[in-house]
Image: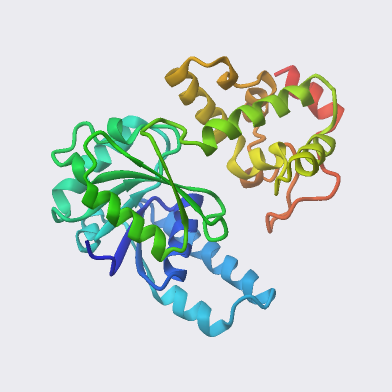
């Protein structure tokens, strides 16, 4: 496998973070999306992230230039032909991911690794209609990808040892610690984190404690970097609901039934950081506004939707 060029398919938040992490590792990376506007926004956010590092004295302008110089973009799927490693970051929809893998097989060389960052869909299921499922693998990165030193790797039913070893080398290049898990939707992190978020929302809905109190209790009590409600805002409340519903369909475990308040917030447009409001409110630069947790009046409004 050649790691001279890596292709990331999908220019939303996860795709942007993956591109930045790969470029920082010294590898050339191609960001592909059907939308020119998404690519433009993606590059702008990547540059803004680098500028923020420069402001914190964590990066030099020369290093920023070098990182950006490793990134190219395209709206043509045919450009993945030059990549040795491809990671898709599309929405968690089996038909979309399965169709993409089938298209990629027609374009790429037989040695190209096809990886999915899917959090809740089995890689075996995604690759079920591929002619060469032995070169497919799941690699689940945690956001913010440039900072979190973890990747969960899952082999499908037909994934070859060569593909698995290539994924390990790729993770090592990115300086990530690998956790290998069985082929099961949700891996370790998503399966455990989602019920925690769901219960935190129920505690809020029942009026047991407010947002800040819930998150403070979980952070200090369990040594977490972020409380469950702040974490939900970062993931995106609509994405959390989507993940929960996917895992419920897969497992029939009641802990994955989305809390009523969570679904009502999404219907009301409270989607987290990306919409500027979720369980907390956020500035345009995505920083959280102090003491901005949902108030009683807002909770009552959402309960009536």
- The quadrant in which the N terminus is found is bottom left
Q: Determine which quarter of the picture holds residue 5.
A: bottom left
Q: Residue at x 61, y 35 (%)?
A: 237
The image shows a total of numbered marks equal to 0
Is 209 left, or right, of 78 in this rendering? right
| Foreground of the two, 223 or 225 | 223
Vertical comparison of 133 with 296: above or below: below
Seen in the picture, residue 246 relative to 218 is either above or below; the reply is above
Residue 100 x/y as whole percent: 27, 42
- Front in this rendered view, residue 79 or 197: 197
Name the quadrant of the C terminus. top right
**x, y percent for residue 79:** 23, 60
User: In the rendered image, which quarter is residue 3 located in?
Assistant: bottom left
Q: Is 219 left, or right, of 172 in this rendering? A: right
- Residue 300 in percent (x, y) is at 81, 21
Q: Residue at x 42, y 58 (%)?
A: 39
Asked if 96 appears above or below 37 in the picture, the reply is above
Q: Is residue 229 left or right of residue 77?
A: right
Q: Residue at x 84, y 36 (%)?
A: 213
Residue 4 in view: yes
Is residue 246 positioned above or below 130 on the image?
above
Q: Can I make out residue 31 in this image? A: no
Residue 131: percent from left, percent from top: 13, 39
């Amino acid at each position: 496998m050649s790691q001279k060029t890596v292709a990331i398919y999908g220019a939303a938040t996860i795709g942007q973070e993956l591109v930045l992490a790969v470029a920082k590792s010294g590898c050339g990376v191609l960001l592909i999306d059907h939308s020119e506007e998404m690519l433009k926004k993606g590059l702008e956010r990547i540059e803004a992230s680098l500028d923020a590092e420069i402001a914190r004295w964590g990066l030099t302008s020369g290093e920023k230039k070098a990182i950006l110089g490793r990134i190219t973009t395209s709206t043509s799927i045919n450009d993945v032909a030059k990549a040795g490693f491809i990671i898709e970051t599309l929405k968690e929809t089996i038909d979309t991911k399965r169709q993409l893998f089938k298209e990629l097989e027609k374009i790429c060389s037989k040695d190209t690794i096809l990886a999915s960052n899917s959090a809740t869909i089995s890689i075996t299921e995604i690759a079920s209609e591929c002619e060469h499922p032995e070169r497919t693998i799941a690699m689940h990165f945690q956001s913010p990808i440039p900072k979190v030193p973890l990747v969960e790797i899952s082999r499908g039913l037909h994934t070859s040892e060569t593909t698995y070893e290539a994924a390990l080398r790729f993770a090592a290049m990115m300086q990530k610690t690998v956790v290998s898990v069985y082929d099961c939707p949700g891996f370790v992190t998503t399966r455990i984190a989602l019920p925690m978020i769901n219960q935190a929302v129920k505690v809020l809905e029942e009026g047991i404690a407010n947002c800040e109190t819930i998150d403070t209790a979980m952070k200090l009590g369990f040594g977490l970097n972020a409380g469950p409600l702040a974490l939900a805002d970062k993931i995106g409340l609509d994405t959390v609901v989507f993940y929960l519903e996917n895992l419920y369909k897969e497992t029939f475990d009641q802990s994955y039934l989305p809390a009523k308040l969570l679904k009502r917030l999404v219907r009301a447009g409270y989607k987290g950081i990306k919409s500027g409001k979720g369980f907390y409110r956020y500035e345009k630069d995505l920083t959280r506004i102090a003491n901005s947790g949902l108030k009683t009046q807002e909770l009552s409004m959402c309960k009536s939707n």
